[in-house]
Amino acid sequence: MNNRQGLTDKIREWYNWLTTHVPSSIRKGVSNAFNTMRKKVVKLYNNSKEEEDQWHDAIKHQKTEDEDEQWYDTNPEEKLTPILTKHGIKKKVKTYVINPNSAYDPAYFLTITKDEVTTLINSETEPKNVSISLACEIVRNDPKTGEEVSTVAHFRSKTHKLIGIDDAEEVLSIMKEKMLKSFSEYQKRGSGWTIGRVDLLEIRIGEFRPLRGKRHEPLPESIKRRKAIVNMKINDDKCFKWAVTRALNPINIHPERISKELEEQSKKLKWEGTEFPTLLKQKELLKQKGVYPYEYMDGFDKVGKASLPPKSKFFSKLNNADISDADYRRAQTVWSTFNMQTMRDY
């Protein structure tokens, strides 16, 4: 009786461990296999009512298929947050890792960390190159000794270029699909290795810069399909100039082309003080909402003023409020950055 009780306790302990780590997507199949094994073991003990009741205790908390989605809610996961581990040359490449303490199936791990990785990638607002690598423990039985041996294998995604934040989630899905395909192919090679638990996930985010100037960079497919962005086909270093001019003069047929008409339209805009290629600082200033002293500019003589008026002159009667110190500093930065000479320039 003591031996039978000990065996029951051991398998109950093993079952509890198994259902703590198995992904919900395959849990039903694992539970069915366990029940099959349970019935066979019970038969070894003459199918006694006592043993059947003990096995029932071991699985009495088993969830049904309808409860699969809530199963992990009763087993809170550890906090899986990316941690910066190192910078590359001149801090242009950052490497982050997520190192789990618990055992996770690779497919499930990529799913539960997706939101954290997406947030991390989107925190880098400039164009970037992104890749991920998953280190997994792989195991097999040594054909000579019969003992289980393990090592670590690395499965890497391709490097993807991200322009904005909208395509990060879709790119991560592509990376995950590629890595899962690698897992499958790895196990089909006949080496006997099987994928075990996740060791760590590495995320590399690098600064993206075109290899040479005057280069047209195709949009990522995820952005191109939306047909919401005009990607100007340039052969010079004035991409910013042509993009602004086209935005102010939209057309339906071949909007990406630099036509004679577009060149003439660009001449009507004021480009003095703007360098080409346009400096990042200038681009950022132009993208921000500025302030203007509307009440102060009450006559043509003010247009020729050779300096920015003091902060008090930006008072708005409409809002009954002064501008903030930050707004005025930005106005001063715009004045100096674009080398303005008079209020006409501003």
Image: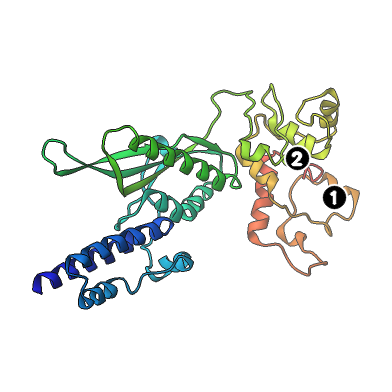
Residue 80 visible, this orientation: no
x then y, percent, for residue 305? 80, 46
Amino acid carrying mark 1 in the image: Lys
Is residue 197 something that shows in the picture? Answer: yes
Using the image, determine if residue 319 lies above or below residue 195.
Answer: below
Nearer the observer, 32 or 130: 32
Examine the rendered structure and indicate whether residue 160 appears above or below residue 334: above
- Cα gap from disc 2 to disc 1, whole angstroms: 13 Å
Above or below, comparing residue 131 to residue 196 in the picture: above
- Count how many numbered circles sit on residues in the image: 2
Where does residue 45 sit, x and y in percent of width and height? Answer: 17, 69
**How did the renderer colour the structure?**
rainbow
Residue drawn at the location 30% of the way across and 55% of the way down = 103
Tell which of 196 and 249 is nearer to you.
196
Instruction: Identify the residue under disc 2.
Output: 341
Q: Residue at x 34, y 54 (%)?
A: 104
Task: Give SS at disc 1.
Answer: helix
Q: In the depicted view, which residue is nearer to us: 294 or 13?
A: 13
The numbered mark at residue 302 is 1
Position of residue 312 relative to residue 143, above or below, is below
Disc 2, SS: loop
Of all residues, the one furthest to the right in this rendering is 300
The spot of residue 221 in percent (x, y) is 62, 36
| Residue in view at x 63 percent, y 30 percent | 218
